[in-house]
Image (cartoon, rainbow, N blue to C red):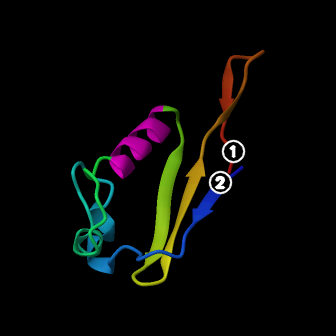
């Protein structure tokens, strides 16, 4: 199973997309628009998802918005197994 979250906001500039999951990283257009934040949200989200065996990624177009995708494994508790879901 895959979860998608989409917005129609300011988007993430192409030249900053590779680093947007870093600590204290904020897109220049978000700062310019006066959107507050520490730059830790996406870093923490990806870290938590990966610690649980999942994956978090996105597509984005500046001025048109972003879509974030999340997958997490589903475990068979009776067998003690993790089964990836995508």
**Which residues fall within the magenta stretch?**
41-51
Residue 63 is inside the magenta segment: no
Q: Residue furthest right?
A: 78
Quadrant in the picture for residue 10: bottom left
The number of callouts visible is: 2
Find numbered disc 1 in the image and state the secondary structure of the residue it sits on: loop
> What residue lies at 21% left-to-right and 51% top-to-bottom?
24
Frontmost residue, 21 versus 39: 39
Q: From the top left corner, tell me how far across and down residue 42 is, in percent.
A: 38, 51
> What residue lies at 26% left-to-right and 69% top-to-bottom?
34
Q: Which residue is mark 1?
A: 85
Q: From the top left corner, tell me how far across and down residue 16 is, in percent.
A: 27, 71
What secondary structure prevails in the magenta region? helix
- Residue 29, above or below 78: below
CA distance separating discs 1 and 2? 11 Å
Q: From the top left corner, tell me how far across and down residue 26 is, in percent.
A: 25, 61
Q: Does label 1 or label 2 sit earlier along the sequence?
A: 2
Q: From the top left corner, tell me how far across and down residue 53 is, in percent.
A: 52, 36
Find numbered disc 2 in the image and state the secondary structure of the residue it sits on: strand
Labelled disc at residue 3: 2
- Residue 86, above or below 47: below
Image depth: mark 1 or mark 2 in front: 2
Frontmost residue, 36 versus 15: 36
- Residue 20, above or below 16: above
> What residue lies at 63% left-to-right and 37% top-to-bottom?
73
């Amino acid at each position: 199973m895959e979860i998608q979250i989409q917005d129609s906001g300011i988007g993430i500039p192409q030249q900053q997309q590779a680093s947007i999951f870093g600590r204290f990283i904020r897109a220049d257009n978000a700062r310019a628009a006066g959107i507050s934040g520490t730059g830790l949200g996406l870093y923490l989200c990806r870290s938590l998802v990966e610690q649980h065996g999942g994956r978090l990624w996105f597509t984005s177009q500046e001025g048109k918005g972003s879509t974030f995708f999340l997958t997490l494994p589903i475990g068979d508790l009776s067998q003690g197994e993790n089964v990836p879901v995508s």
